[in-house]
Amino acid sequence: MTACPTGIAHTYMAAEKLTQTARSLGHQIKVETQGSIGAENVLSDNDVREADGIIIAADKEVDRSRFAGKRVLAVGVAEGIRHPEQLIERVRSAPVYGGADADGAGAGGGTAPSGDSGDSGGGRERSVAYKALMNGVSYMIPFVVVGGLLIAISLAVGGHPTPEGLKIAPGSFWEDVNNIGTIGFQLMVPILSGYIAYAIGDRPALVPGMIGGWIATHGELYGMKDASAGFIGGIVTGFLAGYLVVWIKKVEVPKFARPIMPIIVIPIVATTALGLFFIYVLGKPISWVFTHLTGWLSGMTGTSAIVLGAVLGLMIAFDMGGPVNKTAFLFGSGLIASGNQTVMGMCAAAIPVMPLGQGLATLIRRRLYSEQERETGMAALFMGLFGISEGAIPFAAARPAQVIPANMLGGAVAGAVAGMAGVADAVPHGGPIVAVLGAVDGVPLFFVAMVVGAVVTALTTVTLVDVAERRKSGAGRERGAAGMVADAGGASGGLVGGGDGGVVAAGVVPAAGEPAVTEPVAAVVGGGAGADAGAGGGSRTDAAVAGVPGPAAAPARGVGQSAGDGDGGDGVVVGGDTSEAGGSDVGGESAEGGADGDGDGDGDGDGDSVLAGTEVLSGYLTGQTVKTQLDAGEKEAAIREMAELAAGTGRVADVDELVRVALAREAQETTGLGEEIAIPHAKTDAVTAPVVGFARSADGIDWGSPDGTPARLVFMIAVPEAAAGDEHLRILALLSRKLMDADFRARLQGAEDTTAILRVLGEIH
């Protein structure tokens, strides 16, 4: 099974590489792809039952429950592209998933955690913890956005300042809206916790994770009346629940009890154990911290206002609703009644800094953030205006090492500036909204404090994230180089080969002269002896490989074939109607030359003239979007050059926006696919219709490819947001597969001119 987060290129390239390798070794293989266009070539129950091993090459969570009792090898998707021979060899000795037999051995047939397959590929891709955390964040974001925006709107329209904070008239319409938003916020941390646990321990971990997250946000359950462990507590309960379930699954139970393990026993045991552990063990230290922080702050009231403001800002920004944040907030709000409103002024200036700063960061360096993160950033900006600090939680949960320090620095600056200016706040709330409603003294400097703090947070965040991404990219290139060395060293070791099985996977055509295997088969790994063992041996090892074939290809628009009478063979028309030529025709309506000749030009049948309207890849790539040699020598300049090339078709409305979106995609994960290939792509309304460009680089461009090779063949694909259907994804899948053919790449690299390039690309259909 192959899968990647975007489900476009890597998914199908890994699938094709595994298929080609198995076929070259004489093995049978069936591969399921889980791409953006859905699961294809899905492994049936029979496929799995007949297989001796499962290879999962994926960078996202996949359901493994159907593989119980089979040998499962789980690696990153890049491993399927770089080391397919090693995977085919290693799966034969991979651990059995779910226990010693097909019943699951205590796991109840549940899905193993992403790192519990026994061999996860050595952490070559994202770690289990990272993927689990991202899983929780992705499910949490809608609750943050919906809940936060409903609360902000209700406060803006129906709220008014009171000594107890911004209040909405009881029984009003806006109180109902506020209550709905509050429910969204109450569910936010349980969802985060639950789906972190789910990514680790699968469905049995969902309930203990969610209930643990609820306990973490309800401090009254463990002696904290006015505070709770917040989102940090939710992250802790998520990981505890996930790994607790994984541990329980390993416990051997009688066979009669296995069916009820995942739906009754494991959830009940894990939920009870986790809940009691948090209440009686973790809750006490959290309550102790809350109490002593309050006493410590009380002792600071006579110190410098700048120092006190900085400390309060640090605390407000640290955990956004957790015990440290609540300690500072309640300390400030408690002094309002005694007539000291300046402490609350410091807190009020720091409260919106986190969402405002993180939202601003997504605008300053958009390429560092995914589309979902940018949308969340806009929502965070809106929530920051209304003093809802929780708008920054998705960013802190996703990148805690970068975001939390940046938040704290910005919060400290805002608090210190407000303290120095003597800003006062008469209500226990923060953000620009309290100034607009007249609850703040020293409004101009209050806004200065918030703006300065937000800018500091934003600049610090993008700096730290950029540094982290550069380090990650450098580490990836080093791993790629190490992998190439390993390949070279392992080439002489001899993998299991021989056998009598051919390979025909969906969308894969056997080479000329090879018989096609028509029956559906599971992947066969092995057959015969290894190269070092010499000839002989007839054993076969079946292995279904989860993740390979892609979509069946529809004939490419504008590409037709017609047999000629001469020596040139079948005529291929690219962008025209039926050809009578003996050789290949590119462009034109009806090439008539050389029907009886040698297919040799000058009316003898080649018809090599290229028109601007020549089209391949379903008409998305034309003669106008092909460049034989890129001028650019680095990635960003190459993407801009490709975007300007595409603009020549009239399908690009905004070149700068297209470049921005393409670079943002690169920031998520490089589109350098290895084998000297890069396929940058973007989905944006900067283009009015799908367009594909192709260019070559003689020297190669560093694209951060997993195998460390520079990109010499560069395709750029751009589609509008509202592009109908998934045809562009199908084209990209076909392109990704075809580029795994070394002969095809060599011919594309060696094509002399645009005419020859289009002829080679016309083979993709």
Image (cartoon, rainbow, N blue to C red):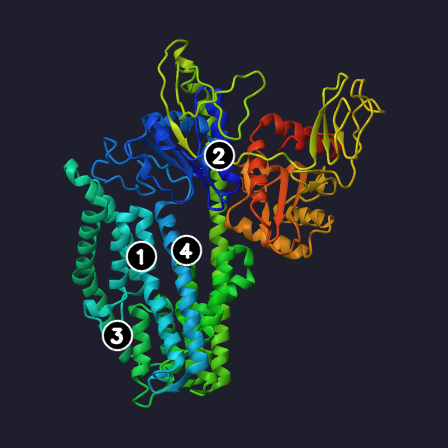
Question: What residue did someone put label 1 on?
Answer: 193
- Mark 3, other Cα within 10 Å: few <14 / some 14–19 / many ≥20: few
Q: Amino acid at mark 3?
A: Asp
- Mark 2, other Cα within 10 Å: few <14 / some 14–19 / many ≥20: many
Cα distance between the residues tagged 1 and 3:
21 Å
Camera-near label (2 vs 3) is 2
Say whether disc 4 or disc 2 marks the residue closer to the N-terminus: 2
Mark number for residue 14?
Answer: 2
Marks 2/3 in contact by CB < 8 Å: the verdict is: no
Image height check: is 9 above or below 270? above
User: Which is nearer the eye, 717 or 397?
Assistant: 717
Residue 521 in the image: state x and y as whole percent. 42, 25
Q: Amino acid at mark 1?
A: Ser
Q: Amino acid at mark 2?
A: Ala
Cα distance between the residues tagged 4 and 1:
12 Å
Cα distance between the residues tagged 4 and 2:
25 Å
Quadrant for residue 512, please give it. top right
Question: What residue did someone put label 4 on?
Answer: 138
Q: Is residue 106 visible?
A: yes
Cα distance between the residues tagged 2 and 3:
52 Å
The answer to whether 603 appears left or right of 743 in the picture is right
Mark number for residue 226?
Answer: 3
Residue 88 in the image: state x and y as whole percent. 41, 26
Q: Is residue 253 visible?
A: no
Mark 1: which secondary structure?
helix
Say whether disc 4 or disc 3 marks the residue closer to the N-terminus: 4
